Image (spheres, rainbow, N blue to C red):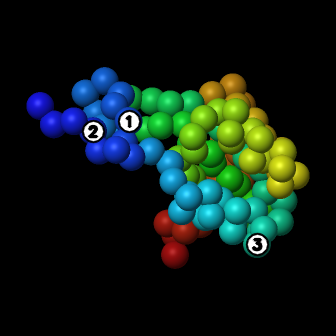
């Protein structure tokens, strides 16, 4: 049996990549170059570690792995971005609208 790499975690029978500094850098770039950004913290699943979904005012979005739920909320607070538990509130309609507009192009 193969062991997970040093930067991976094991969830059930699936190996997932852990978050890294490139993920944090990408999230920081998104919050500093968009307006009206909100954060949605997504829980760990069988195929993905904890993720932070950032959605801008126009629905543009990005998602990256993060070290923990607490890290995600702390990141959002530090950058004055409201953050929510995505398992409770879901994702905003403007994100779904943005995805639809992108498909229509």
Mark 2 or mark 3, which has the lower sequence index?
Answer: 2
Residue 60 seen from this side: no
Helix, strand or loop at label 3? It is helix
Mark 2 and mark 3 residues within 8 Å of each other at the beta carbon: no
In the displayed orientation, state which residue is furthest to the bottom.
105
Q: Alpha-carbon distance for marks 3 and 1?
A: 31 Å
Q: Residues within 10 Å of mark 2 (few under 14, many from 20)?
A: few
Q: Nearer the viewer, residue 99 or 60?
A: 60
Task: Relative to 51, say whether 96 is above or below.
Answer: below
Q: Alpha-carbon distance for marks 2 and 3?
A: 35 Å
Residue carrying label 2? 4
Helix, strand or loop at label 2? It is loop
Number of the front mark, 2 or 3: 2
Number of the front mark, 3 or 1: 1
Residue carrying label 3? 33
Helix, strand or loop at label 1? It is strand
Q: Residue at x 54, y 37 (%)?
A: 50
Q: How many marks?
A: 3
Q: Measuring from the top left, give residue 8's x and y in whole percent.
A: 36, 42
Mark 3 and mark 1 residues within 8 Å of each other at the beta carbon: no
Q: Residue at x 57, y 44 (%)?
A: 66
Mark 3 or mark 1, which has the lower sequence index?
Answer: 1
Q: Alpha-carbon distance for marks 2 and 1?
A: 6 Å
Mark 2 and mark 1 residues within 8 Å of each other at the beta carbon: yes
Q: Residues within 10 Å of mark 1 (few under 14, many from 20)?
A: some
Q: Residue at x 57, y 53 (%)?
A: 63
Q: Measuring from the top left, give residue 89's x and y in whole percent.
A: 72, 31
């Amino acid at each position: 049996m193969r062991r997970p790499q040093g930067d991976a975690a094991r969830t059930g029978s699936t190996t997932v990549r852990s978050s890294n500094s490139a993920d944090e850098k990408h999230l920081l770039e998104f919050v500093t170059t968009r307006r009206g950004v909100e954060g949605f913290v997504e829980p760990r699943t069988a195929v993905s570690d904890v993720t932070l979904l950032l959605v801008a005012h126009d629905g543009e979005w990005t998602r990256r792995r993060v070290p923990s739920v607490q890290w995600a909320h702390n990141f959002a607070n530090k950058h004055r971005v409201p953050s929510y538990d995505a398992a409770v509130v879901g994702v905003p309609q403007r994100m779904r609208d943005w995805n639809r507009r992108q498909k229509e192009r």
